[in-house]
Amino acid sequence: MAVTVPPRHDQTEEPSAFHIEQHGIDHIRESERWGRPSSLFWMWAGAVWNMEFVVYGALMVVVFGLSFAQAVLIGLVGNLFYVLTGLCSIQGPVAGTTAFGVSRAAFGPNGNRLPSLFNWITQVGFEIEGIALIVFAGVALGEKAGYHPGTPFKTVLIVAAVVIQAILPFLGHATVLKVLKMLTIPFIALFAAMAVLTYSKVHVHAVHHGAGWGSMLVALALVIATGGLGWTENANDYSRYLPRDTDPRRIVIAVGLGAGVPSFLMEVLGAAIATGVPAATSITGMLGAFTAWFTWPFLIFAIAQLFAINTLDLYSSGVTLQSLGLRLARVHCVLLDAVVAGGFTAYAVFSNRFYQLLSDFLLFIIVWLAPWCAIYLVDCLLRRNRYDVAALMDTRGGLYYRSGGIHWPAIIAQVVGMVAAFSWLDAYSPYVSWLSSHFDGSDFSVFMGLFFGGLVYWLLAARGVKREVPVS
């Protein structure tokens, strides 16, 4: 039976930060909804004013061979995809649960375990990336202090990073939003300082011709995967505390601007720095762009930024584990994820293959994420953003249980979308699709996954999903 949630009358008082959040994937009652769209703006800004995006901008110039003008164009186009993050934030206030709680409506409670598993692996992968970069920055600080770090020092850094990283996700939603908002202004100040201090090293006209369209498309895929598309599966984890009658347009605008503007500016800065300092494709490589006195504050701020952005991944991976069916509290899932990420980080750091593993990971996540995002949004459109709250929480029956808990149209669309994405994916030596090899090494995997995943789901599920709307 559908649950009718009463409309909001009063704005609930914001809960105190630095207390452990008790909620996980369960439904947030209207009496506990305290968020505003502006809180999402500041949260995303605090996470995305981040050194990782400077590295992505540098990669466009150094690895993909783009000119500065091409990198600016690709950054502008790619960051428009933060609209997807905004659109994937509007279901949380209505359904009152996380992204992969809402995803049960499209896939069914059992069918939803497949994309939930993909998402958990993706979140842990980003956690590993962030912790490894923190360790590398810590090693650089040690070297600047005259110490030559060895294996024991790196091991201590990994353990310390894992412990510190778990604190904010362990405390939960209110603490995450408050701290990230506080960090936004100092992070903007760091961006301004970097822009001023690297101005003399920049040679934006050093490359006139740039890369061909194939390399530009691969760079675009990277920007989309690490930006707007890459955050869609996290979005409702943070919007679910907004009152259910919050204007969806305000949510989309707040999320799109809060994440898209800093992402674009940081990538442009990275591309500019790389025109004069090719080593800027890593955080430690950027040190060559600065005078000696700025090294310490730069590395310290970079470490803080990496902890900030990793907070969102670790929080989301915890609630995703719950959607997989683990009967653990959210805080226990966070601790389990932190340990898993720490173990794989040690492998990545000590194997000397970190950057190759990172490149492969970023390109291959597109394969599952693009079709899932399309299915998720098409399902939302078909049901007019109306959900049966009780059915979303029911893993043994209810409106979305259908055939053994699996909605086969979504599973079929997911598989078709993944095959389509694979068919035009250029992931360098591990995998180059036949379409990529025939079209100048281009990469249309994002668009193939989005188009075919969404189209197949629409064709197979439209009639049935529309029949569910009145029940919701």
Image (tube, rainbow, N blue to C red):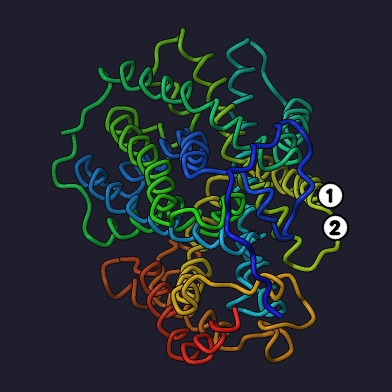
Choose top left, top right, bottom left or bottom right for residue 440.
Answer: bottom left
Number of marks in the rendered image: 2
The picture places residue 342, in percent across and down from the top left corner, at 74, 43
The picture places residue 184, in percent across and down from the top left corner, at 48, 28
Residue at the image point whose x is 78% and y is 51% from the top:
330
CA gap, disc 2 to disc 1? 6 Å
Q: Please, is residue 346 above or below residue 24 in the view?
A: above
Q: Seen in the image, is 291 located left or right of residue 102? A: left
Query: Label 2 belongs to which residue?
Result: 328
Give SS at disc 1.
Answer: helix
Choose top left, top right, bottom left or bottom right for residue 393.
Answer: bottom right
Q: Nearer the viewer, residue 369 or 299?
A: 369
Residue at the image point whose x is 23% and y is 48% from the top:
73
Mark 1 surroundings within 10 Å by alpha-carbon count, few (fewer than 14), some (14 through 19), many (20 or more): few
Figure quadrant of the C terminus: bottom right
Query: Label 1 belongs to which residue?
Result: 332
The picture places residue 100, in percent across and down from the top left corner, at 64, 65
Q: Amino acid at mark 2?
A: Leu
Residue at the image point whose x is 62% and y is 32% from the top:
134
Q: Amino acid at mark 1?
A: His
Mark 2 surroundings within 10 Å by alpha-carbon count, few (fewer than 14), some (14 through 19), many (20 or more): some
Choose top left, top right, bottom left or bottom right for residue 386.
Answer: bottom right
Mark 2 and mark 1 residues within 8 Å of each other at the beta carbon: yes
Figure quadrant of the N terminus: bottom right
Q: Seen in the image, is 338 located left or right of residue 33? A: right
Q: Nearer the viewer, residue 447 or 426?
A: 447
Q: Please, is residue 410 above or below residue 212 in the view?
A: below
Q: Seen in the image, is 375 located left or right of residue 54? A: right
Q: Nearer the viewer, residue 116 or 442?
A: 116
Q: Nearer the viewer, residue 81 or 125?
A: 81
